[in-house]
Image: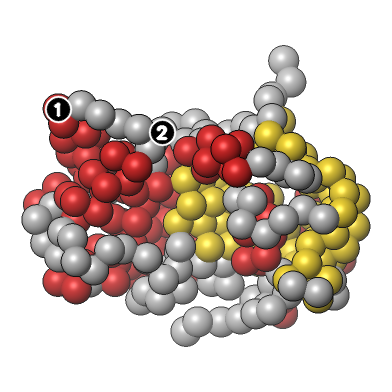
C-alpha cells in the first residue's frame, strides 16, 4: 500500500521579497519520512520551510501540504494548516514574561482549547515527552539553551501535528545537547511523525543517515536521486 503524500511541490519558485531563492522545486514527502534539508547559509533552507508553513506566499508553481493548496491559501486555511504542523525555531520564540507551563497553555488557548483540565493534561503530557516536567514553573531565562529547545519542541507537538518542521534546531547548542535533541526527533519520528529538519550540523546527519535535500546554486537537489553528485560535507557550514 502506497504511503500518504503529505507534501507535494511542483514547478515551485521560492522568493524572499523580489529575490528568487530557489527555482524549479520538485518535492514529494511521504508520511513518516525523516528528511534533512542542508546547504550553506543563504541558500534557501529557511525560505523553503517558511513556504511550507505559508509564512512566505507561493507565487509560482503548485504546492500541497496536508491537502492544503499553498497558492492563494486563505488566512483561515493558514491557521488550520499550522495546527497540523509543528514548527521548531532556532531562536526559540518563547514568551519571556510567562513560565514554561503558561507558554504552552497560551498556545492551546489560542488554538481553541477551552477546558482547563484538558489544557493541564496536555501540557503535562508534552512536557513529560520532552523530559521537562520538573521545569514547568521556570521562566525561559532560567533555562539552558537545550532546555529551551525542549520546551519549543513540546510547544510544537501540543496539537499532535502530522508534520514536524525544524529550522536549525541544534544550531545554538553544544554537541552533547545537540545529540539529545536529535534523539528526541528520532523518537518522534519512530512514533509516526514526519520530520523535516534544516541543519548545517554534519554530526547530526552522520548519526542518523536519512534522505537529504540539498539547497545549492538556487536548486533543491534530492540525495535519493542524485547521491553520486553531492559532496555533503562541502555543502554544510560546520558549527564546531
Q: Is residue 34 visible?
A: no
Residue 35 image position (x, y, % from top left): 63, 50
Count residues near mark 2 (Cα–Cα under 10 Å), then give few for <14, some for 14-19, many for 20+: some
Q: Is residue 183 left or right of residue 232?
A: left
The residue that disc 1 covers is 117
- The tag on residue 109 is none
Dot 1: what SS?
helix
Task: Look at 23% across and 44% down and name the residue there.
Answer: 105
Quick one: 63 or 171, which is closer to the camera?
Answer: 63
Residue 34 image position (x, y, % from top left): 58, 45
Quick one: 174 or 45, which is closer to the camera?
Answer: 45
Residue 21 image position (x, y, % from top left): 79, 71
- The tag on residue 160 is 2
Which of the marked residues, 1 or 2, is nearer the chain's N terminus? 1
Establish if 20 lies above or below 35.
Answer: below
Task: Look at 72% across and 56% down and name the residue there.
Answer: 57
Report which quarter residue 19 is drawn in.
Answer: bottom right
Contact between marks 1 and 2 (CB within 8 A): the answer is: no
Q: Is residue 3 left or right of residue 193?
A: right
Task: Look at 37% across and 74% down and name the residue there.
Answer: 173
Report which quarter residue 202 is drawn in.
Answer: bottom right
Dot 2: what SS?
loop
Report which quarter residue 217 is drawn in.
Answer: bottom right
Q: Is residue 230 left or right of residue 104?
A: right
- How far, Cα to Cα, is label 1 from label 2? 17 Å
Q: Nearer the viewer, mark 1 or mark 2?
A: 1
Amino acid at each position: 500500500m502506497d504511503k500518504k503524500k503529505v507534501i507535494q511541490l511542483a514547478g515551485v519558485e521560492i522568493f524572499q521579497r523580489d529575490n528568487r531563492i530557489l527555482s524549479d522545486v520538485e518535492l514529494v514527502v511521504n508520511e513518516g519520512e525523516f528528511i534533512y534539508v542542508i546547504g550553506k547559509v543563504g541558500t534557501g533552507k529557511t525560505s523553503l520551510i517558511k513556504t511550507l508553513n505559508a509564512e512566505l506566499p507561493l507565487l509560482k508553481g503548485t504546492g500541497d501540504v496536508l491537502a492544503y493548496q499553498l497558492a492563494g491559501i486563505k488566512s483561515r486555511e493558514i491557521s488550520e494548516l499550522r495546527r497540523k504542523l509543528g514548527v521548531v525555531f532556532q531562536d526559540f520564540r518563547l514568551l519571556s514574561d510567562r513560565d514554561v507551563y503558561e507558554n504552552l497553555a497560551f498556545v492551546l488557548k489560542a488554538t481553541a482549547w477551552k477546558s482547563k483540565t484538558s489544557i493541564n493534561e496536555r501540557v503535562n503530557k508534552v512536557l513529560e515527552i520532552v523530559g521537562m516536567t520538573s521545569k514547568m514553573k521556570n521562566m525561559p531565562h532560567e533555562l539552558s539553551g537545550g532546555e529551551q529547545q525542549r520546551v519549543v519542541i513540546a510547544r510544537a507537538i501540543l496539537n499532535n501535528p502530522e508534520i514536524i518542521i525544524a529550522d536549525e534546531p541544534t544550531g545554538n547548542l553544544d554537541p552533547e545537547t545537540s545529540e539529545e535533541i536529535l534523539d528526541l526527533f528520532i523518537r518522534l519520528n519512530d512514533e509516526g511523525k514526519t520530520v523535516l529538519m534544516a541543519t548545517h550540523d554534519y554530526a547530526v546527519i552522520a548519526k542518523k543517515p536519512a534522505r537529504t535535500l540539498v539547497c545549492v546554486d538556487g536548486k533543491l537537489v534530492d540525495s535519493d536521486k542524485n547521491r553520486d553528485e553531492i559532496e555533503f560535507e562541502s555543502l554544510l557550514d560546520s558549527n564546531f
